[in-house]
Amino acid sequence: MHWLVRLLLIRMWPSRKGLAARIQALELENLALRQQLAVLQRGSKRPKATTWDRVFWVGLSQAWRGWKEVCLLVKPATVVGWHRSGFRLFWRIKSRRRGGRPPLGRGLRNVIRQMSRENPLWGAPRIHGELLKLGFEVSERSVARWMPRRPFDPQRAQTWKAFLNNHRELISAMDFVVVPTWNFRQLYVLVILDHGRRVIRQARVTAHPTAEWVRQQLRDAFPYEDLPNYLLFDRDAIFGATRAFVEALGITPKQIGFRSPWQNGYCERVIGTLRRDLLDHIVIRDEAHLTRLLQDYLRYYHEDRTHLGLNKDSPSGRPREMKPNEPAMVVPLPRCGGLHHRYRWTQAA
């Protein structure tokens, strides 16, 4: 180590020029030769460089240009390798992990993989919401990290306007969903949605929608003691023919702008949810078949499915279930014929 101290003392002097610079170079050369002689005098047939020897030569290589000419015990490339190893060690120490979240347990990781495997339509937010209902304290980012890799869905949620967000408890919306059958016929599903808790009041099926049929669905959906302040709908001619009837119910109709589906964003989003969660995976036979599937899905939608807009809760309000005891296990409850699942704790056998 004293060789390193001597090197530092020589380099502490201000920069020299001319004769003084040559004298300084001679001092450094003398120091390098004496250091190598001390290494040879250690008594070993093949002496090994210690850590301080490596530090000395790395420092000398940075302080003196002529160091390669007096480097006799090792090759100059070896000194360069020492310098690179020191660089890697420095940044490894500087970048080491300090604290952070505790690692996830193996049981929780297995549950995340199980949910992801059994529900290929679910992303990290849906799985995270299900885990919260089971009492797991875990971040959504950790859930995404431990999910098995699968094809990425580029679709993004639409932006919701401030008016709809601030008055959602007072607003309902309606729109049609067109569903093709196995023989290429078209069925129409009228969806009536409450913005507040994302409750689907109606999802009725017909092959021939008319204004009178829509009026009857509005009567069934809105009892006189439970009316919204506003009802949003698009510029479909059938909806336009029901405008006077909506006003007679005591509801203010709001027709969205031309080619502006984003103005009815909540209803458009729930229609997209119906397609992604159910309709895109089923071959519809007839009206009765579609009606039965919608009834099953609406039960899952209202009672089991967690929603981003409801802080990972369900429209009907799903209580958080805590783990009853240590040997308890998470078990799936099939919904919609196994297309989706609800999870709950069960006592171990």
Image: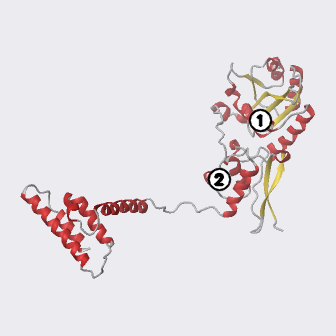
Name, please, the residue furthest toward the front. Answer: 45
Tell me the kind of residue under disc 2: Val
Name, please, the residue furthest toward the bottom. Answer: 43
What separation in Å lies between label 1 and label 2 (alpha carbons)? 25 Å
Q: Which residue is mark 2?
A: 143
Residue 93: which quarter of the image?
A: bottom left
Q: Check whether the beta carbons of the residues at disc 1 and disc 2 lie within 8 A of each other.
A: no
Q: Would you call the spot at circle 1 few (<14 residues within 10 Å), some (14-19), or many (20 or more)? A: some
Residue 225 appears in the rendering: no
Q: Position of residue 131 (x, y in %)?
A: 71, 55
Residue at x 18%, y 69% (from the top left corner): 31
Residue at x 82%, y 45% (from the top left corner): 300
Instruction: Say above or below: 67 vs 285.
Output: below
- Of residues 131 and 154, the one nearer the viewer is 154
Q: Which residue is mark 1?
A: 275
Q: Would you call the spot at circle 2 few (<14 residues within 10 Å), some (14-19), or many (20 or more)? A: many
Mark 1 element type: helix
- Of residues 169 and 204, the one nearer the viewer is 204
Tell me the kind of residue under disc 1: Arg
Q: Position of residue 264 (x, y in %)?
A: 71, 28
Residue at x 90%, y 38% (from the top left corner): 292
